[in-house]
Amino acid sequence: MEPNVQPGVPVAEPGSKPDRKDDTKGNLKSLSMPELLERLGSSPDGLSQAEARSRLAQHGPNEIQEKATNAFLKFLSYFWGPIPWMIEAAVVLSAIARHWPDFAIILLLLLANAVVGFWEEHQAGNAIAALKAKLAIRARAKRDGKWVTPEARDLVPGDVIRLRLGDIVPADARLLEGDPIEVDQSALTGESLPATCASGEAVFSGAIVRQGEIDAIVYATGKDTYFGKTAQLVQVARTVSHFQRAVLKIGNYLIILAVSLVVLILCVAFFRGDQMLTTLQFALVLTVAAIPVAMPTVLSVTMAVGARLLARKEAIVTRLAAIEELAGVDILCSDKTGTLTQNKLTLGAPFAVDGVTAVDVIRNAALASRAENKDTIDLAVLGGLSNGEELKGYEVVHFQPFDPVHKRTEATVVGADGKEFRTTKGSAQVIMALSINAGQVEPAVEKAVNEFAARGFRSLGVARDDGGGAWRFLGVLPLFDPPREEAKATIAAARQMGVTVKMITGDQFAIAQETAGKLGLGKNILDASGFGGTDHPETPQLADAIEQADGFAQVFPEHKFHIVDVLQKRGHIVGMTGDGVNDAPALKKADCGIAVSGATDAARAAASIVLMTSGLSVIIHAITESRKIFQRMNSYAIYRIAETLRVLLFMTLAILVFNFYPLTAVMIVMLALLNDGAILSIAYDNVHYKNTPEAWNMRLVLGVSTVLGVIGVVSAFGLFYLGERVFHLDRAHIQTLMYLKLSVAGHLTIFLTRTRGPFWSIRPARVLWIAVLGTQILATLIAVYGVFMTPLGWGWALFVWGYALIWFVVNDRLKLLAYRVLDTTATAAAG
């Protein structure tokens, strides 16, 4: 390609630096193209690699540097909020009352919560940053006269790039010679319709190419782009999922319960004439211990651990809440090509109309293909040529790429004889509609297409125009995309997990039926060409058909959104796979949008999970992992409610009935400190997931946790009775006794809540064992040697351990009974 310059306007030497003084004034987007090329020191042939490296060092990476939060200020933010305020109030009240041991321990709790929260969020942030790095957008740039694919961050002013359907524009650029393209700038300008941009016009970083293909020259990168920070390519959306909403409801329930009981204690203390300063300090500490301080940290750690595990399986999570949504997915709408099939098209023996040879059909189709685009159809057609010299002597002077609207490619070609002609390939029906000889060849073509479809072949029509706009149909190319070897077994595995897979394809009905049959999906395929528009609600009969279908054929992009919408309105949690720019709305609409391997930048940006490897099996791995996470969080919820009920009810009843504080404020703080520290390890625990989609059963969660909580109160009062009435211990020793009992029994509870069956049915993860054993050894040593409390001695400590273990076994039996009564679908053997 010759440089696009006017005579007399010199192009700057490759080694010169572009003058950027007018960049910020916006002049570069309005200069004439020759002046722009001169200013940038470039040409339509692009830069050399050496020059690109030099300019990258000068201008910096093509990215918006996010403003880093000051780590110290971030740490201080953990001391601001309702829960920190309550702890800080308890610290101040301890100082006023001169209870210095209480002051030291409560202050330690405050610092510990801040350190743990800050560190875990920092680690989760690092994990997400690492995952985002794997999703780095790559551009197509011409360097040293060859097309290469550097990361978008390595683009520099003067680079020549190629923009194609589905690309996110990686930098501000001016379009070079070529057909106009349609660009969606709605995220940047608010314009709802795509804008048509012609040669010489500017396109801005962050816009999406909706139609067409053209080369462009970069004139601004990074912070100098017109829209600056709006060009965020990958975002972690902070949306609250179904799962998080349920857990937050539990947190609110516990806070309300804690505050209500504390108010009751304060009222009784006031009427009894107790010292209000001490009572208020104690009430605040009790509230802090009851409130699930660790809940946000446990959530973020569990999600980050899940995201890292999925990343090892080549599934990159861009929205952490999507892991939770996956646990409830019961319908997965899956693309056929590349997900259920290998996306390795092979060319069969062509069908040619009378007077045309198979070689002519393949040659004309090959002329309407472009190897450098790496399109699977184009590569299959080019692979059908008998030798690489077959296209020698032909010059393609204009190429119109495929788009979902026109469903064909077109090339204007000059032959060896100097005559110009056009060739096109695409959907057989589309090509037939163009052709003047359709009437004569249609019956034979339809028969050939149907025969190909019955064998699972896609049909590609080919036509040629030798002048005057009269297209002549040449023949049909059959393309076969074999099913993935593991697809059938994966679909069967999904069914066993309670997930229905529905195939979605733009192929003909017969091809869809044939492929679905080979994959074991069933042959109830619905022809989407009969669907109404997205603005018209479906009839109940059609909605029923969509819900019951095994797959959909002849699907246009707008149909995907419609299918997801209908299924969601029917109460399903829907997962959706896609790869194209027009799949983006459906990916956003689905409860969990999944961009498959090789997806366009636009599809990746819209999806919650991006697959880096082909096939459906990684999605099943993701669903499995999400269900494990759900089980961990379900265990945590039951544990947290049971423990809160146990501590609150025991303390409240002891104060109201016996006018005795069975724990000191320091003991309550240490209980909370040790519990919150160890419970983080549940994010790594071994669990068994159910073979059905997960959904919160609040009746079961509250029921089982209430049983465990109330039985815990009974066992606590049993030990209180033994200590006071049988062994006649003084109140100071009884307080230490009760502290150790609540600490040991409380942590043993996690081994009850983590299984639906007997506590031994699932082996705990080593990290959970170590965390619980470590904290309870520490709690025992504190009680035995009397750190901030009356020493208990080893004899009483062993007695408490024995008492707690006996009740642990009793509680396990009662838990199994509670599950049998409250959940008829669960069996004790389920684990």
Image: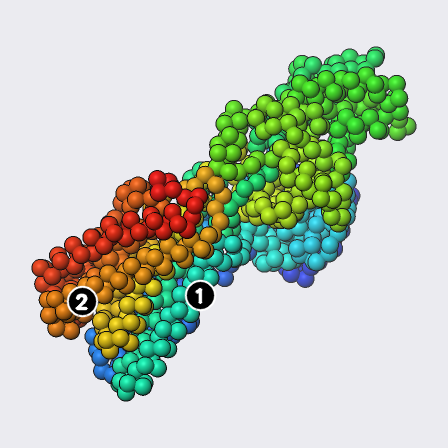
Give the image quarter of residue 416: top right
Say whether marks 1 and 2 touch (CB < 8 Å): no
Disc 2: CA contacts within 10 A as few (<14), some (14-19) or many (>=20):
some
Residue 591 got which mark? none
Image vertical order of residue 6 relative to residue 386, above or below: below
In the rendered image, residue 410, in percent from the top left (x then y), is placed at 77, 30
Say what secondary structure mark 1 lies in: helix
Q: Is residue 478 left or right of residue 651?
A: right
Task: Give the mark nearest the N terminus, 1 or 2.
Answer: 1
Give the image quarter of residue 259: bottom left
- Which residue is found at the position 37% from the left and 66% from the top? 291
Q: How many marks?
A: 2
- Which residue is found at the position 69% from the left and 53% from the top? 185
Give the image quarter of residue 337: top right
Q: Can you say which quadrant of the picture contains the C terminus?
A: top left
- Which residue is found at the position 77% from the left and 23% from the top? 462
Q: Can you say which quadrant of the picture contains the N terminus?
A: top right
- Which residue is found at the position 69% from the left and 42% from the top? 543
Q: Is residue 645 left or right of residue 737?
A: right
For the residue pair 539 and 330, the one nearer the viewer reads as 539
Residue at the spot of label 1: 252
Residue at the spot of label 2: 721
Q: Amino acid at mark 2?
A: Tyr
For the residue pair 4 and 683, the one nearer the viewer reads as 683
Q: Is residue 679 left or right of residue 34?
A: left
Q: Amino acid at mark 1?
A: Asn
- Please, which residue is most extreme toward the front here? 821
State the scheme by which the image is colored: rainbow
Say what secondary structure mark 2 lies in: helix
Image vertical order of residue 549 relative to residue 5, above or below: above
Image vertical order of residue 520 relative to residue 802, above or below: above
